[in-house]
Image: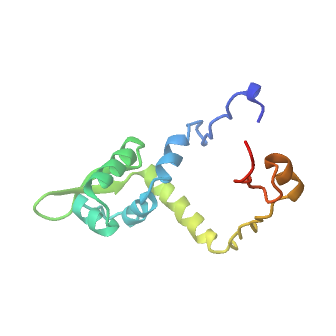
Amino acid sequence: MDRREGPAPPPVGNEGVDLRPVLTLLGRKQALELLGALAPGDGLRFTELERRLTISPRSLQSLLTGFFRAGLIGRARLPGEPARWGYVLTSSGQGLSGIVQRVLQTGGDVPPVRPAPVRWSVEPSLATWATGSPAGFPDPLARR
């Protein structure tokens, strides 16, 4: 990219909304597991999420705050007595959860990418030119 062009435009959704915050949120550790845990729609309490995700309370609270600010989760009264409140996916969160599930299912059909082989050889003539030593390393006995 030429520096004079400026930064790339942000990825936008159908309504022209900047998707960077959501994509950043999904890149966080255990974010996809949180979406998966809330996907059935039953609603889960904080302690239940903490147990299912095996995550520290502080990390879970940070993740929930990010999802809440993005409008992906909300709090709802859970059925039963006494009254209990839990976290549920909003309609946006359910839509995103469906997309993530499809991506994960499709990902199993894609063959893994093998890393390129690493070559550790150094061109002898370049090493001699750069350091003055045929091996590419400075000669410890050479006069300085």
Q: Quadrant of the N terminus?
A: top right
> Would residue 136 be found to the left or right of residue 56 on screen?
right
Q: Is residue 143 above or below residue 54?
A: above
Q: Position of residue 42 (x, y in %)?
A: 31, 65
Q: Nearer the viewer, residue 10 or 144?
A: 144
What's the residue at 45%, 57% (across, down)? 94
**Colouring chosen for the image of the structure:** rainbow
What's the residue at 42%, 43% (across, down)? 70
Hey, which quadrant is residue 139 in on the image?
bottom right
> Would residue 126 be found to the left or right of residue 38 on screen?
right
Residue sticking out furthest to the right: 125
Hey, which quadrant is residue 6 in on the image?
top right
Q: Nearer the viewer, residue 24 or 39?
A: 24
Q: Is residue 15 above or below residue 89?
A: above
Q: Nearer the viewer, residue 62 or 122?
A: 122
Q: Is residue 68 above or below residue 16?
A: below
What's the residue at 67%, 31% (across, down)? 7
Q: Position of residue 96 (x, y in %)?
A: 50, 55
Q: Position of residue 39 (x, y in %)?
A: 41, 63
Residue sticking out furthest to the left: 82
Q: Position of residue 129 (x, y in %)?
A: 86, 48
Hey, which quadrant is residue 37 in on the image?
bottom left
> Would residue 133 be found to the left or right of residue 84 on screen?
right
